[in-house]
Image: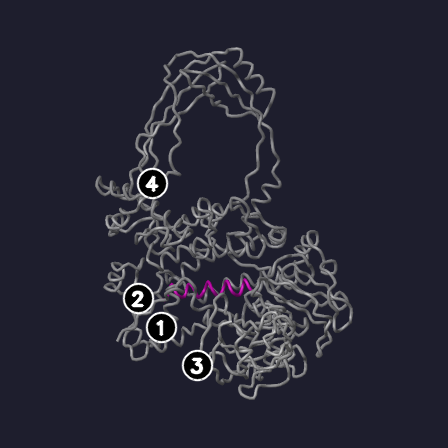
Amino acid sequence: MVISWHLKEERFLPAWSVDFPAKYQDWTVTDPLDLFQAPILKAESNPKAHIRRHLSQEARDCGHLVLWLDCDREGENICFEVVECTGFHGNEARRRVYRARFSSVTEKDILKAMDNLVEPNEDEARAVDARQEIDLKVGVAFTRFQTSYFQGKYGNLDSRVISYGPCQTPTLGFCVQRYLQINTFKPEKFWALHPYITHNGYELQLEWERNKLFDLDVAVMFQNLVMEDGIVEVTDISEKQESKSRPSGLNTVNLLKVASSALGFGPQMAMQLAERLYTQGFISYPRTESTAYPSSFDFKSTLGMQTNNPTWGDYVQKLLDDGFHRPRSGTDAGDHPPITPMRAANEDMLGNDAWKLYQYVCQHFIGTVSPDCKYVRNKVEFSIGGEIFRCIGQHVIVKGFTSIMPWLAVNEKNLPQFKKGEKIEVSKVELYEGETSPPDYLSESELISLMEKNGIGTDASIPVHINNICERNFVQVQAGRKLVPTALGISLIRGYQCIDPDLCLPDIRSFIEQQITLVAKGQVDHSRVVEHVLQQFKQKFIYFVKQIENMDALFEAQFSPLADSGRALSKCGKCLRYMKYISTQPSRMYCGTCEEVYYLPQKGTIKLYKELTCPLDNFELLIFSLAGPEGKSFPLCPYCYNSPPFEGIDTLFGATKTSSTGKLGKGAGMPCFLCPHPTCPHSLIAQGVCACPECSGTLVLDPVSAPKWRLYCNMCNCLVYLPQGAHKISTTRDRCPECESTILEVDFNKKTTPLLDGSTLYTGCILCDELLHSLVEMKHGKSFFKRMGSRGRGRGSGRGGFRGRGRGGKWDDPKMSFRDF
């Protein structure tokens, strides 16, 4: 029996990621310097997918393993993870492991790959391991230190994490370098002569051979000479046939540049669209550095699939009838063929954005097999007052590939007929005054070119690095997809330049990539490369920490101290003085008296919760609300959220402010809906109602959701809408005798009460009570689930070693249902 493994919809996401063990996750107790020698471990990127368990189960009783992972280094790395999970890692078992090499998911390529199976390449897999370990340890060490240092001092940084990355930071450096060029640019005035003549009905502006001058007096002198002469003489006429070459094959970098400059898609979005088109079989593998097609490529069949297209079908048919051209010889990087269309499609099949990208892929491919564009270039030279002027015209004789790629067409300009020696009167002479201008901010397309030129990132990671500097508020994307660095981004790069310019220059990353390539080729042991590079960065980190005051001086001039930021909101439980709420990212509370910072949930609003206090530490409670009609609202204690008082919660729910990689988790800390305090009226024990039907969490009453009362799950996105328009709904201390769910007390509106006697107060279980059960509606994410059936019992439980209020009947019991609202 043979098992073939292919990561389908998740093939572009790493199935496994590297991280530090749990003991190194807490920022407050781990010295960032220790991370350079810390062990690392590999774990599933999405544990809920249970890929390891699935692989192990599928591999039972299988004699051979065929690996159909993406054909790049990352794919090769995942190959060996699959080998380990399936138990084919012994010497004898490895002889029954095969690797399929393919560039698209068409039937032809799949059959060809199956007929030419090879062994997986362990050297390429090791190269990925080396890069992952270096990037993790270097990035996390610098990120933790500078994030903790600066967010503990300044309140308006407006960034959740002040990250460093061996690729990300040089990428930011390019943007800041251009910014500094713009701001230090000093404009200069210049002058140029523009004589005009009229000939055979054409008015022409002649171009000066000197182009422009930076001295007004000299420019005026030449103007007077030309005006005194007043007659131009044709001194030379030339005509030359030129051609504009058709493009080479399309690789990833060129696709990203076109997507940004012409289609308006950022690199990240462009890659997501390309990946989707690939998984659906519409284009070939979109991660490739090659622009040269293999000799065996079937151009005729690929073109034939496009003959029915209403836009370019006729052009393609003409190419097939007249004979298409072989593409220009490009670069063969030894990875995959250029990106080409593999199936015919239309906009209705793909959607607007994906169609735009697919359309360009098709047009580019058709352009590669089209004739070159040919045109005639006419140049006429004139003499007047001893100065030389010229005019140039262009006339297209063969459109070639520009018929299918009209944005690359040659601009035509017709000239009248001239004769050598002919003399023509000058109609006017303008002295144009202009001013030199600075370069514009870097566009995404230009940044991608710089990254490629300097070896920053790979075709797969370039979009990620650009997206990171945008998400972390180091740069902002403005009109024309120009990248404008923020005050934070500028301060960081200038700080690195003051302390250690290598940290933000592309040279050091290029060196790392060269070493990684040697590992991939089997020429260097990967552990020696990792050890050498980490030792270099460790020394740089030690020096950086000692010199951090140099960067801090730049931050001090640009940002406000925590004490001057935010607004007074709630009282500190230690000193009983007001703490300030700082709303800029990362949102947090700051006590100026205790000089303590308390991080809060992100991307929502914070308000004081009725001046209520936490019974454990006397801190005033806050209410956090996510945006949108379906956003959760829940109370939290700032101190408990950062320092969970109950054992087990900090590891289960990530109470530290960020993960090891520098990302703030969605559920970081302990809100009240996770607190097992037995008597607090806001805890899980008091506000939990019953088990969640979608996961192992608990449905909790939203205390501020009136008049649209609801329950929400403390673990997932499940929402349960309670009787609408009720004046008040609250939990009681009573339990349902049938399912042990918490009994709710509902105070109906007098005008809309469903009670027959007109009374308004009612208590019952939303699972077992006929009336309440008929008035609830479940909503999960953006989809409604309404299932019919009778009620019954079930049991659920909370997490973290304590019993939550998820003890009641489970909604997804086959005997239970939500009735139509």
Within 10 Å of disc 4 (Cα), the crowding (few <14, some 14-19, many 20+) is many
Disc 4 to disc 2, C-alpha distance? 38 Å
Which residue is tagged 1? 83
Q: Residue at x 35, y 42 (%)?
A: 247
Please state the horizontal and vertical placement of residue 538, each as a whole percent of the image.
56, 63
Identify the residue position indicated by label 3 in the image. 814
**Horizontal relation, residue 111 to residue 286: left or right:** left
SS for dot 4: loop
Question: Callout 2, which amino acid?
Answer: Arg
* Sooner in the amino-acid sequence: mark 3 or mark 2: 2
Q: Is residue 124 magenta?
A: yes
**Dots 4 and 3: beta carbons under 8 Å?**
no
Rounded to the nearest whole Å, what is the CA distance between mark 1 and mark 2?
A: 11 Å
Q: Earlier in the sequence, mark 1 or mark 2?
A: 1
Range of residues picked out in magenta: 122-140
Quarter residue 571 falls in = bottom right
Q: Secondary structure at mark 2?
A: strand
